[in-house]
Image (tube, coloured by chain):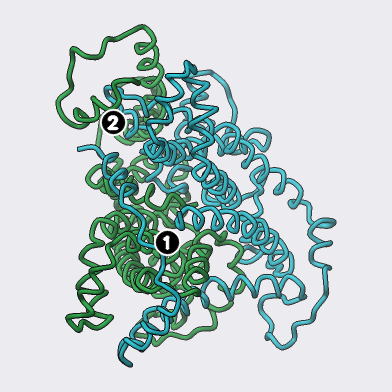
Amino acid sequence: MSDLPLIQADRAVPPPAATTPSGGRRRRLRLLSRTDRVVITLMVLVPLLLVTGFVWLPAAATVLLSGTNWDGIGPLNEIEFVGARNYSDVVNIYPPFVPAIQHNLLWLAVLFLVASPFGMFLAVLLDKELRGSRFYQTALYLPVVLSLALIGFVWQLLYSRDQGLINAVFGSNVDWYGDSNVNIWAVMVASGWRHVGYIMLLYLAGLKGVDPSLREAAAVDGASESKTFFRVVFPVMRPINIIVLVVTVIESLRAFDLVWVVNKGRNGLELISALVTQNVVGEASRIGFGSALATIMLVVSLVFIAIYLATVMRENRQ
Amino acid sequence: MSSATASRRTEGGVEAPARRKLTPARLLLHGFLIAVALTWLFPIAWAVLTSLRSYEYTAANGYVSFGGWTIDNYVTAWQTAEFGKHFLNSVYITVPAVLLTLFLASCVAFVIARFSWKLNLVLLGVFTAANLLPQQALLIPLFRLFTEVPLPEFMSDSELLYDSYWGLILINVAFQCGFCVFVLSNYMKALPRDLYEAAMVDGASIWRQYWQVTMPLCRPALAALATLEVTWIYNEFFWATVLMRTGDKFPVTSSLNNLRGEFFTDNNLVSAGSVLVAIPTLVIFFMLQRHFVRGLTLGASKG
């Protein structure tokens, strides 16, 4: 049985009728009994408290702490505000900061410019009526079910200097995970391996949602297949494109597991996420640095989350 | 492409062999796709292969060789890394976390979908965005919070939220709720509204509308989400790494990192351990692939 018709079935469901006429809200509230109102409040409040308490308040606290000299251990009432000092310290006297920023940007560039387009390309190929399409798809998104930590171990079997397959086949003697000149590329290959399948999946769903009459019209006009894709199909998939962009940015910002299992984000594998973690649970606990770094992550991610929400909510309203 | 509509029928069913000719272009396409697919499968296949060979044999003959087949690596890995215990830990965390996530998320999603209040959009945003924040950015205050909140001893021998299953369950639920709220509220909004009108006429309370009208209709979405969430929470690495201390209590994905020390120079053992850890997700993937894929594309949002 194929999965694709099911996705289409979901998309085929018409959106619900527009919201109730004005004044409907008050009428509906009056229709609710007191028990109903209590139940509704609880249904929203309990999850809301959980998300606020464990996600939003800590996020706000991170921003606040980045302006203080708190050491992470002392009582909270001894906190002093130091303004932007943590930020200037991070930039000026924290050697791993610049490499970490570079690595995060490199990560983003590789995922965005290589892995995502390749995933899209495969989706376009697999969207044709092909024999064995199911096998190709399964092979490509199999890595998506594996954790990135596990992927670090799986690729070690290829990368290891003494026991790895790559060195054995090519007679080289490179420590792919250990050499700080190459290890960032090695982990990015492993990360891209997983990313491609995921992006392919998103675009396959997106392509199924494209109105076939658009393509037929383009074919009647004599447009070539690639021209049809770039001029007609790709622009129509704008929401998916934006979602893929955001997913890619957030993935590269969150990249952590892979470098942490390799060497805890040191020696060529510095990433912002790993630096934050090192500053909290590592030997050198510097909360100020950590919070300033974490705030940078938060700000970047919130910009893209806002783009994402604007996109999906507009989609939903249509 | 012109046969697209006609051939839809045959999808998943019997192929119609006479209709498609293997043109050179198509042959090239298949060749390319087979090459890519095999490349993609290779790392996993290699791990399985390595795990089935004895260390002595590969040490003497190199990995590019044939022979030395054994299952001893699995036995050794299972015993040394105490996989039995860690798998159980993963179950203790994953099962309650997934059930709680689906329950709480469906409650919020129901209210968002059932009523058209202005605040619903804000609520949806608050939940969805929470799922996309980088976890590391919350670590510092959460770490402090977890080491401050006491738990009674019968709940956790650390007597804190830190280093307890409860803490991990709660943080996973808080993080994953957003994704499920997003998917479920969309799904519920597509249900016909007459259902509620009819239920109201019958005098059904809000709770009964949620539990007996909406939830049974959401089974496909819930199945897809359950499959995805089991995989994600089982695969979760970061929170368990930083919010747990006792080695014995680590779930299996995070215990991987300790495994490196124990297996340090034996890649065959590392591969056996990796395959063992991958088995639950691979079983889920092959048995419930339809749900898995569907969950991902329903939301199209998970970072």
Secondary structure beneath disc 1? helix
Percent of width and height locating residue A230: 54, 27
Q: Amino acid at mark 1?
A: Phe
Q: Residue at x 25, y 74 (%)?
A: B197
Quickly name the residue at label 1.
B182
* Residue B244 is at least partly visible in this image: no
- The single residue placed furthest to the bottom in the displayed view is A34
Q: Viewer-proximal residue, B130 or A224?
A: A224
Percent of width and height locating residue B284: 27, 48
Tell me if residue A290 comes above or below residue B220 in the rendering.
Answer: below
Tell me if residue B148 comes above or below residue B270 in the rendering.
Answer: below
Tell me if residue A3 comes above or below residue B182 in the rendering.
Answer: above
* Dot 2 alpha-carbon crowd within 10 angstroms: few under 14, some 14 to 19, many 20 or more: some
Report the side of A189 relative to A20 (left or right).
Answer: right
Task: Give the letter of the chain under mark 2.
Answer: A
Q: Residue at x 45, y 56 (%)?
A: A316
Report the side of B251 relative to B162 (left or right).
Answer: left
Image quarter hosting the N terminus of chain B: top left
Q: Which chain is cyan?
A: A
Cα–Cα span, label 2 and label 1: 28 Å
Please identify, in this view, whether the residue under mark 2 or under mark 1 is nearer the observer: 1
Q: Which chain is green?
A: B
Secondary structure beneath disc 2? helix
Percent of width and height locating residue A100: 70, 48
Quickly name the residue at label 2.
A134
Q: Residue at x 19, y 28 (%)?
A: B10
Q: Residue at x 21, y 76 (%)?
A: B199
